[in-house]
Image (cartoon, rainbow, N blue to C red):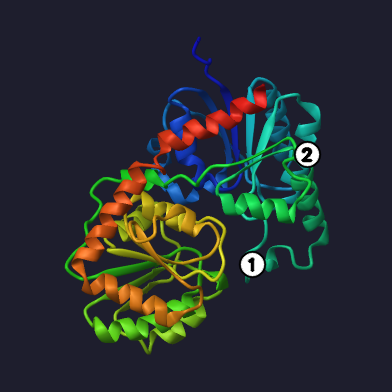
């Protein structure tokens, strides 16, 4: 049997670039990859963008969204000709209504098969402001997703949620592959190692669904049993004021309430012993994908796709959502039992190098691409 020829892939990341950088880099090992993104997606990378992206990837950065800019439309019209020269188009869903209308326009004017990834079929709790009072935006998003014949989800949970929320989507082809690890963050030189202070990390956008209040309630108990332990909270968002208020009554809590670069984020993960995700609801998680990349054990709520990307008892531990007592007990168990923490760290390494390794995930995604070409 002859070997299948390389694919020409157009990967459009006008959003979620960080989640798909590893995909672009690893697909380019065996295929021709064109990556198209926008300027604001590069902000977290700063001056490091040039070496984070493989030189095998053909990347073009488009202007940010400016609805009155003729250049905006010219640049995106050019994508149609690029799409016609590719074998497969992989689009990442975003909430911008103009870009979504453009996607639907492309779909009607090219015979190239396309596949759409929707990271969050439903807004997280506290995130409904994205569509509240914006019926036109909501209608356009519903139209785009419902009319797209091919869907690739980044977890089995999200795939099932897609079927429930958008029953008409993915009628041509629907599949799921686990979210890949954020390996590019581990490539920064001279990253620190954990010191003698047991460090628990909570990172990411501070929204209601992240369960920060639950974590702070749990930390009241943890800090009594482990006065030398440190909780580091990194991020900004709507829950920042609540964290500041509660921080005054807690010991050993470091709150980095500002925008951090990717380099800084990598340093916080590198020096942590344990990553906590006390989410009240979730789909898949970029924070979990980052913890996997750094081979850090996770203590998380049993919600969404989090259990899929964790080998319970091996690479991490799960607790009921909203249960501060259970969360405190599990964190304390990890801090007091060095053998348990070491066991979980070894399991996290096996997970990263095993079923969630990029070469394996890319092979699965390639299989779904080829299925659309038959």
- Whether 87 is drawn above or below 65: the answer is above
Q: Which residue is identified by label 1?
A: 127
The image shows residue 118 at horizontal and vertical percentages of: 64, 48
* Residue lying at the far bottom of the rendered structure: 249
Left or right placement of residue 248 versus residue 91 in this view: left
Query: Do we see residue 68 in this rendering?
Result: no
The image shows residue 207 at horizontal and vertical percentages of: 55, 70
Q: Quadrant of residue 244?
A: bottom left
Query: Do we see residue 56 in this rendering?
Result: yes
Tell which of 131 and 280 is nearer to you: 280
Q: Mark 1: which secondary structure?
A: loop
The image shows residue 344 at horizontal and vertical percentages of: 29, 59
Q: CA distance from mark 2 to mark 1?
A: 25 Å
* Badge 2: residue crowd in 10 Å (few <14, some 14–19, many ≥20): some
Left or right placement of residue 207 versus residue 26 in this view: right
The image shows residue 311 at horizontal and vertical percentages of: 39, 55
Point out the tag, 2 or 1, that comes first from the N-terminus. Answer: 2
Tell me the number on the disc at residue 104: 2
> In the rendered picture of this protein, how many numbered marks are placed on residues?
2
Q: Mark 2: which secondary structure?
A: helix
* Badge 1: residue crowd in 10 Å (few <14, some 14–19, many ≥20): some
Left or right placement of residue 369 versus residue 98 in this view: left
Which residue is located at x 70 percent, y 40 percent? 72
Quadrant where the C terminus sits is top right
């Amino acid at each position: 049997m002859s070997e299948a020829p390389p694919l020409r892939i157009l990967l459009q990341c006008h959003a979620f670039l960080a989640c798909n950088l590893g995909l672009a880099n690893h697909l380019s090992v065996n295929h021709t990859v064109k990556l198209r993104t926008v300027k604001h997606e590069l902000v977290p990378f700063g001056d490091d963008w040039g070496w984070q992206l493989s030189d095998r990837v053909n990347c073009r950065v488009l202007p940010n969204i400016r609805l009155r800019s003729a250049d905006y439309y010219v640049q995106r019209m050019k994508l149609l000709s690029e799409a016609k020269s590719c074998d497969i188009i992989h689009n990442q869903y975003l909430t911008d209504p103009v870009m979504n209308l453009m996607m639907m326009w492309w779909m009607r004017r090219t015979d190239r098969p396309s596949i759409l990834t929707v990271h969050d079929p439903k807004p997280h709790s506290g995130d409904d402001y994205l569509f509240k009072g914006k019926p036109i935006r909501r209608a356009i998003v519903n139209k785009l997703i419902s009319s797209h014949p091919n869907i690739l989800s980044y977890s089995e949970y999200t795939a099932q949620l897609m079927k429930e929320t958008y029953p008409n989507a993915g009628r041509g082809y629907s599949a799921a592959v686990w979210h890949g690890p954020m390996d590019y963050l581990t490539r920064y030189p001279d990253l620190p190692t954990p010191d003698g202070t047991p460090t628990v990390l909570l990172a990411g956008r501070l929204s209601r669904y992240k369960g920060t209040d639950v974590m702070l309630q749990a930390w009241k108990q943890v800090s009594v049993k482990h006065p030398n332990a440190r909780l580091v909270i990194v991020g900004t968002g709507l829950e920042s004021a609540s964290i500041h208020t509660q921080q005054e009554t807690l010991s050993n809590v470091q709150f980095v309430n500002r925008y951090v670069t990717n380099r800084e984020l990598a340093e916080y993960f590198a020096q942590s012993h344990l990553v906590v995700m006390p989410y009240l609801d979730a789909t898949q998680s970029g924070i979990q994908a980052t913890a996997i990349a750094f081979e850090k054990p996770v203590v998380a709520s049993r919600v969404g796709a989090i259990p899929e990307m964790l080998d319970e008892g091996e690479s991490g531990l799960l607790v009921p959502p909203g249960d501060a007592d259970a969360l405190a007990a599990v964190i304390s168990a990890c801090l007091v039992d060095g053998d348990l923490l070491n066991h979980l760290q070894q399991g996290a390494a096996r997970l990263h190098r095993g079923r969630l390794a990029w070469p394996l995930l890319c092979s699965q995604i390639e299989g779904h691409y080829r299925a659309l070409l038959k």
